[in-house]
Amino acid sequence: MSPVSDKETIYSIIRGLALPFFVVDHDNKIIFFNEPLEELTGYSEQEVLGKPCHEILRSDICKDHCPVKETMATGRDAVNLEMTIQRKNNLPIPVRITTSVIRDKEGKVIGGLESFRDISFLKSLRKEIREKCTYHKIVSRNKKILEILDDLTDIATSNATVLIQGESGTGKELFANALHELSPRKDKPFIKVNCGALPETLLESELFGYKRGAFTDAKKDKPGRFQLAEGGTIFLDEIGEISKNIQVKLLRVLEKKEYEPLGSVQTEKANVRIIVATNRNLRALEQSGDFREDLYYRLNVITLNIPPLRERKEDIPLLIEHFMESFNQTVYGKINGITTQAMKLLLNHGYPGNVRELENIIEHAFILCRENYIAPKHLPDCLTDRFPSPAVKGKKLEELVDNFEKQLIEETLKQYGGNIERIAEELGVHRSTLWRKMKKNNIKHSIVEGLG
């Protein structure tokens, strides 16, 4: 068989392949464009021959990061890379592409091949699954979470006090917000108070307000959060941190629906639905005498226990996609997906900071990623360097734990610019505990002051 007939035979074979693909020369100009790709794009082969592939595909990534050009330069194939191309009529088509090099008999690279798989159906299926797994901004397919969501409407329509328990970062505020949005009070205010962020005297005036002259700087009357929430819902986060004095006043609101602002002799009525949350074990606090028994039982009418992220690993891919979609709408730019290796690291992580930590990790990756896919190199070091180095061998467990605790606090100090409230919240400890651990680990206050 002559070389000409060899070439014709090869072309007749590849033209019959059902997989859409094209072939480019070393200058990225199209030299072959098969019939399935004609059907996918709306272009005929004659319209595209000799033209750069990015002019035809008009992909969201081709101009800055051409996969087939990179494959020809490096020899590394791209496999199942997601991108969006444009049909001739400007209709976007989500596809997965695979690239490979074409070599001559001597092994020299003379071109590249790029194949396509239309994933429009897969994208719409993903969207449908995401929509089904998203309820009032709560993203989950976890059995325990779904059981809570099944009861959420019934709980919301009542006026019963709700206690939401879960580790820091599990999304307790989202559940509180959903309860308000589903309730008959949804058109009234939803007021949030972080009880652990305020000292006792300030917290009391924030909750109940004060009258002019109640203390030195009280130049005029100020409404409290209960008054601002009138007719609506008040969400008291970190309820386990409040003092016994505040506990007594809150119990009065729960039992009698009334309170007195600081400096007032007049009783105010409170038409407010109360939702509280804590990352601490209220039952244990009650048994130890740090939390009033009568208040505990008043708060514990309905309890929602939110599982930590390590117990709902099936939610991680959904949450990653949710956060990526959110960050793609910000100044960070456009990222199309995440590599398999990076996903494996994220699935294997323990998430002491739960969903909030995962969101921070994805934001970190968006800041560092200058490509179209998040790879392991874009993730924080704590995910990629997860095993102790040889330097730690021979050290006692207590020493290792202390070193890790010190490093974690120092890193979080830097991350949040010395904001003690944010740092304590991120680490899931009370501010007084944080100060104690800083003193124990000889972390000077000047570090905080210098960062602030």
Image: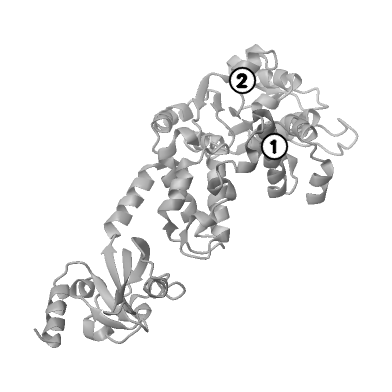
**Horizontal side of residue 410 vs 67, given as left or right:** right
* Total numbered labels placed on residues in the image: 2
- The residue under the point 13% across, 82% down is 6
Q: Which residue is mark 1?
A: 403
Vertical comparison of 1 with 245: above or below: below
Residue reaching furthest right?
Answer: 216
- The residue under the point 69% across, 41% down is 407
Q: Is residue 242 visible?
A: yes
Q: Position of residue 259 (x, y in %)?
A: 71, 23
Please tell me which residue lies in front, 124 or 315.
315
Callout in the foreground (2, 1) = 1
In which image quadrant can residue 112 be found?
bottom left
As helix, strand or loop, the secondary structure at mark 2 comes to helix
Q: Which residue is mark 2?
A: 282
**Horizontal side of residue 263 vs 301, given as left or right:** right
Q: Quadrant of the N terminus?
A: bottom left
In which image quadrant can residue 135 be found?
top left
**Horizontal side of residue 435 vs 302, given as left or right:** right
Instruction: Categorize mark 2 by other alpha carbons within 10 Å: few (<14), some (14-19), many (20+).
Output: many
Amino acid type at image mark 1 = Asn
Amino acid type at image mark 2 = Leu
Please tell me which residue lies in front, 88 or 299.
88
Q: Position of residue 412 (x, y in %)?
A: 68, 44
Cα–Cα gap, marks 2 and 1: 30 Å
Q: Position of residue 271 (x, y in %)?
A: 61, 27
As helix, strand or loop, the secondary structure at mark 1 comes to helix
Instruction: Categorize mark 1 by other alpha carbons within 10 Å: few (<14), some (14-19), many (20+).
Output: few
Vertical comparison of 118 with 134: above or below: below
